[in-house]
Image (cartoon, helix red, strand yellow):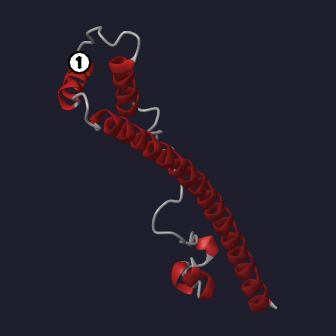
Amino acid sequence: MATMALDPRPAVNPGPIDAGGAPRMLSRPADAPPPLPHVRGGDAVRSLHLDWAALHGPNANATPSGVGRRVLDKVRRILSPGRGDHELVGALIRAVDALAVRCDELADRLSTQEVLMEDVATSYGEDITRLRADLAQLRATMRDG
């Protein structure tokens, strides 16, 4: 857009406004896409927390089914008493959670920027169209007068 602000001629169609020569500003639409889904509320992170809670919660001896059972079996095989593995797995889960929170924050910021960019592009396009119409009218007035 900086190039267009310095020299808008290459970005604007050369035809007259009444001949359908609408301004061409962006090579792609500036419509904001749907927002990115949050990672922290996603199935993978939620499942990780639930499995960890099942491993250490009041029903730790209950046998889960499906994916939760496989995850718990692997975690139990990895963990051995007297080693720091238990703390390591807990730290990894906290790190995954922190990364998920940061990803969600970035997704929210990106969504805000995309909506702002859509508004700016729409406003800029309307201004250019208005200026072109005024310029065409001024040229017609100068030709006739």
Residue 135 appears left or right of 62 = right
Element at label 1: helix
**Location of residue 119 with respect to 131 vertically, above or below:** above
Q: Residue 56 location in percent, x, y?
A: 37, 20
In the rendered picture of this protein, how many numbered marks are placed on residues? Answer: 1
User: Which quadrant, please, contains the C terminus?
Assistant: bottom right
Which image quadrant is residue 84 in? top left
**Location of residue 93 with respect to 25 vertically, above or below:** above
> Residue lying furthest right in this view?
145
Q: Which residue is mark 1?
A: 69
Q: Residue 68 location in percent, x, y?
A: 27, 20
Residue 60 appears left or right of 24 = left
| Residue shown at the point (63%, 74%) measured from the top left | 17
Residue 75 appears left or right of 1 = left
Q: Residue 45 location in percent, x, y?
A: 39, 33
User: Which quadrant, please, contains the N terminus?
Assistant: bottom right
Q: Residue 116 location in percent, x, y?
A: 63, 58
From the viewer's side, name the closer residue of 82 and 3.
82
| Residue shown at the point (46%, 39%) measured from the top left | 37
From the viewer's side, name the closer residue of 40 and 110.
40
| Residue shown at the point (60%, 52%) measured from the top left | 112
**Location of residue 61 with respect to 114 vertically, above or below:** above
Which image quadrant is residue 126 in? bottom right
**Location of residue 76 with respect to 33 vertically, above or below:** above
Tag 1: residue type?
Arg
> Is any atom of residue 76 visible in this view?
yes
Residue 18 appears left or right of 3 = right
> Is any atom of residue 33 visible in this view?
no
